[in-house]
Amino acid sequence: MKKVYIYDVNEHNLAEKIEAVFAAVNLAMKGKTVLVKPNMLGPFAGDSGVITHPEVVSAVVKSCLSRGATVKVGDNPGGVRKGTVETGEATGLAAASHGCFVPINERVDEISLDSEFAEKVLISSLVREVDLIVNVPVFKTHILTGLTGAIKNTYGYVAGAYKSKLHLQAPTRRRMATLICDLFAIRPPDLNIVDGLTAMEGNGPSHGSIRKLGKIIAGADAVAVDAAVARMMGFNPADLHLLRIAAERGYGTIDEAEIEYVGEVPAAIPGFQIPVTYWPREEALKAIQALPNQALPGADLIVRRSTLAPHLAWPEKCDRCGDCAANCPPQVIGLNPYPEIGRGCISCFCCVELCPNGALEVDLPDNIIG
């Protein structure tokens, strides 16, 4: 049985509950070097729900230090124009790391990858050098992968702009999920603690809606932890490529019969909004049929992939910074003077995710085409 710990937390008992997780999992840390790996997507505020909350990182670091570990805290931010040091300072994660924050992108290794989509990959050297990894992702949805949790957070092993290259090499949801599992296998974390102080719903991982949740979800089995998060969001874990593939490979379990919950059993959050890219088939069909001049070619209801491109939804939010163009893997976004997405869009949604102002959006569900 795999244990998953789900605890109610608030500003008063957060450190106590995180310490309870460490005590229960009982990793031998004395004299070991530990990488604490938060989600540091970009220079978002600590309480934005986009990044791991600094208070969670602070409590995790303290628990590791109290066990005699040498601690390193770091992540590779998303995008090609976001510096690690600057992002750490802007998010408050550097200050919350009790002197343990390191720019993990300064030393990288090119390693062979057992993947059908990439023969080699650049990852931060620390990922393979440390004795233990404590993975501290955020409870939030993701328009490409459904959710971003323990498994997806290991995509942050990849250094700098190499993430963009990988999107080009695995340009569909199923392929990208497979590639993320390939990366996860490089170094599965030893402990996963999902920051659920807030939950991001809707079109995460950057500009979805935030609701107070007040939970942590933790365990040594990253797949089981993500399965609990998925159930709380209202997903069937087996319907998410990322979780299903990881379970099929034996990286962990999504089977509730093989999971023992401590604290509480995961239950769907009432009214929780999943990304439009994962709407149920019936809702997706209604939305597509409501579009003008939209052809539905046959009974299989396959939609032209060109309809799935993101777009500038809120020009008033756009400051024409050019981050969307700079971070577009196929380089098909131009500024004229506002973003225009040209032919060749692979619907990776990097522009939506990395827009600092939330000016871009994706409105059409693509689960009809798988």
Image (cartoon, grey):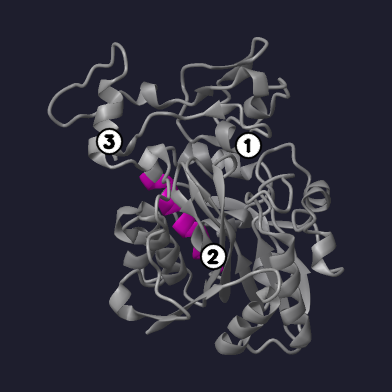
Question: What residue type is disc 2 on?
Answer: Ile
Q: Distance between the residues labelled 1 and 2?
A: 25 Å
Question: What residue type is disc 1 on?
Answer: Leu
Question: Is 292 displayed left or right of 338 in the figure?
Answer: left
Question: What residue type is disc 3 on?
Answer: Glu
Q: Which mark is residue 283?
A: 3
Location of residue 52 in the rendering, given as x and y in whole percent from the top left corner: 66, 58
Q: Can residue 106 be seen in this view?
A: yes
Q: Which mark is residue 186?
A: 2
Q: Which of marks 1 and 2 is nearer the N terminus?
A: 2
Outermost left residue: 299
Residue name at image x 40 percent, y 50 percent: 271
Q: Which of marks 3 and 2 is nearer the N terminus?
A: 2
Tell which of 317 and 296 is nearer to you: 317
- Secondary structure at badge 1 equals helix
User: Where is 162 relative to 2, above or below?
Assistant: above
Tell which of 96 and 251 is nearer to you: 96
Q: Distance between the residues labelled 1 and 3?
A: 27 Å
User: Where is 239 relative to 359, above or below?
Assistant: below
Q: Do the residues labelled 1 and 2 touch (CB within 8 Å)?
A: no
Report which residue position mark 1 lands on.
354
